[in-house]
Amino acid sequence: MERAGGGGASYQRFPRVRIRELRDDFAKFELRDTDASMANALRRVMIAEVPTVAIDLVEIEVNSSVLNDEFIAHRLGLIPLTSAAAMSMRFSRDCDACDGDGSCEYCSVEFHLAARATDSDQTLEVTSNDLRSTDPKVCPVDQARAYQHALGGSEPFDTAAAADQRQLPFLTFPFPFHEGILIVKLRRGQELRLRAIARKGIGKDHAKWSPAATVTFMYEPEIRINEELMETLTLDEKRNLVESSPTKVFNIDPNTQQVVVEDAEAYTYDDEVIKKADAMGKPGLIEINAKEDSFIFTVETTGAITAYELIMNAITVFRQKLDAVRLQDDDGDLGELGAHLVGG
């Protein structure tokens, strides 16, 4: 690799993104004109380095349930919280405005939970809907969805509007579709009362801070059919060829009786159809290659942030990392990596 100004060939690329499908918690997009290292780096940033807010400290005041304190604290930490404001928050370790006790508007959000079972015949289910936040912009995802459902809206949850109205922490949610995430069950006389502190973090530190349920990418396949060889097959042989693929990649056109590519992206690089063609004595009948500069991403979120926010925040974090490397390079502080880049 030649460094800029070194007189060598330039390897600079300008990646392009095209969104195929976008919902609150799901996105599918194409990333083109780049290589696998950049695609995988973006995937890893989305999983492990986009910040969110999660409960990190729990002070149990009363717990007479069947679960011990540590168990409940662990379950609280895994409840996804709305984290649209996480990028602008401070990490608690970097905050100079507090001593880490949770009473800080810059780096933490305080939650309270108080529940007691009084009915002798019914089990009381304590869920994420019982958590009360001091900051309406940060609340359990199920509460945000219930609030949106109560308003009859179809747009993504507007945490800013909720913050202005200061209503969200005091709502009750009778909708069966939004029952909340179960924390513990209480019988008569049992009680749970606690204070929790939510902080900004990243998935690299703990999985509870990861905003991604799954992030995958695949090379875009390029499929070529040798029409001349295909003409030598009978209709039954064409059917056998199509059925040899575990996924519905190929089909037979009912009008022309020709084998056509129905869904190239369903191909899983299993080579079964190629092996079938070879077994039929028709090598080269179908050629399948991966486009090494074109990738198809599938992204699902936990609900802490929307899929769009996850992608945009990941690009922001990725650029910050590249800028940090560039600054180190300018300072001549890359060590062995710098020597490698200049061919040493």
Image (cartoon, rainbow, N blue to C red):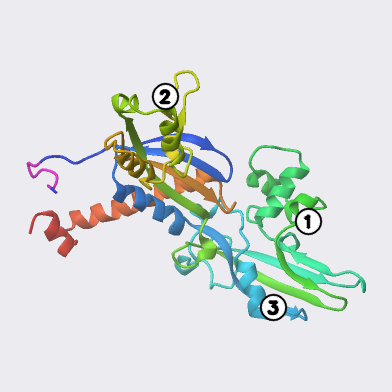
Question: Who comes first in sequence, dot 1 or dot 2?
Answer: 1
- Between tags 1 and 2, which lies in front? 2
Identify the disc placed on residue 170. Answer: 1
How many neighbours does mark 3 have within 10 angstroms: few (below 14), some (14-19), or many (20 or more)?
Answer: some
Residue 101 position within the rendered picture, expressed as x and y whole percent measured from the top left = 59, 73
Visible in this render: residue 113? yes
For residue 258, the mark is 2
Q: Residue at x 71, y 62 (%)?
A: 128
Look at label 1 and name its amino acid.
Phe
Task: Please state the horizontal and vertical placement of residue 298, each as a whole percent of the image.
Answer: 47, 45
Helix, strand or loop at mark 1 = helix
What residue is at 74 percent from the left and 68 percent from the top?
A: 113
Q: Which residue is mark 3?
A: 60
Tell me the element at label 2.
loop
Residue 103 visible here: no
Give the residue type at disc 2: Gln
First in sequence: mark 3 vs mark 2: 3
| Image quadrant in which the C terminus is located | bottom left
Crowd tier of the residue under label 1, counting other residues whose Cα lies within 10 Å: few below 14, some 14–19, many 20 or above: few
* Residue farthest top in this picture: 255
